[in-house]
Structures are given as C-alpha cells and as structure tokens.
Amino acid sequence: MNHAMAWDVRIGDEVIVNATVLTLLGSGRARVRIPTHNYPCAIDPPAGAKAGDRITIAGHVTEVDHDKGRVTFKAGGLVTVDIASVAAWKSVLRDPP
C-alpha cells in the first residue's frame, strides 16, 4: 500500500478510508461516518462491529478531481472524500509510460 500523500491516485485504484460506526441497522448493515464525506452511509460492517467502533473501508476509485483534491470511490454506494481522508491506496497495474 502507498500513502495517499503521493497523490497519484487514479481511477481503478483501491483506496482505504477510516470510518466510525454510528449505528447498526436491522438489515445487518451499519450506518457509518467517513471524515470529509458529507453524509452518513450504510455498509456491510466487519463481524462484531458496534456503535462507536473505528473501522476501515476499502473501495475502487471511480473519479479523481485533482483541482478540488477529492476522490470518489465505490463502497456500497459512491463516496466522495478529500484526499486527506484517504489512509492508504494501492495502485492497479498500469501500462508503462
């Protein structure tokens, strides 16, 4: 994994963000808060998760906005965060330049 500070995140890469579990839903999903994402979202939580737990969420990048310093990734639904919220990322195989 590379740290997002390199800011070479591209579409298709996998990013990891930290989140806090807000509540567990009756459906078995969890409502979580992700820093710099303006809305809570529902995800499939790790086994044993409970309200207040800090967890990590991984997803594949669908959009990168270098001008605004934001990245969108798929984690159940689409999640857009500031690049500073990305804890780590893993690049996909790319063609050599």
Image (cartoon, grey):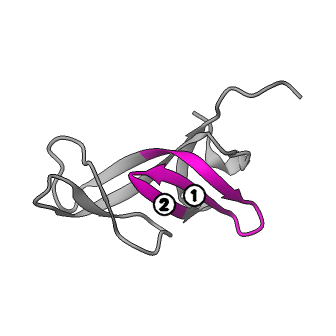
**Can residue 78 be found in the magenta stretch?**
yes
Residue 80 position within the rendered picture, expressed as x and y whole percent measured from the top left = 54, 63
- Tell me, for residue 79, which label it has, or none: 2
Location of residue 93 with respect to 14 vertically, above or below: above
Please, what is the dominant secondary structure of the magenta stretch?
strand
Residue 34 position within the rendered picture, expressed as x and y whole percent measured from the top left = 41, 63
Q: Amino acid at mark 1?
A: Thr
Tag 2 secondary structure? strand
Tag 1 secondary structure? strand
Q: Amino acid at mark 2?
A: Val
Contact between marks 2 and 1 (CB within 8 A): the answer is yes
**Can residue 33 be found in the magenta stretch?**
no
Residue 51 position within the rendered picture, expressed as x and y whole percent measured from the top left = 18, 61
Q: Judge from the rendering whether residue 39 lies leftward or rightward of residue 1; answer left or right.
A: left
Screen quadrant of the C terminus:
top right
User: Which of these two is toward me, 35 or 80?
Assistant: 80
- Tell me, for residue 72, which label it has, or none: 1
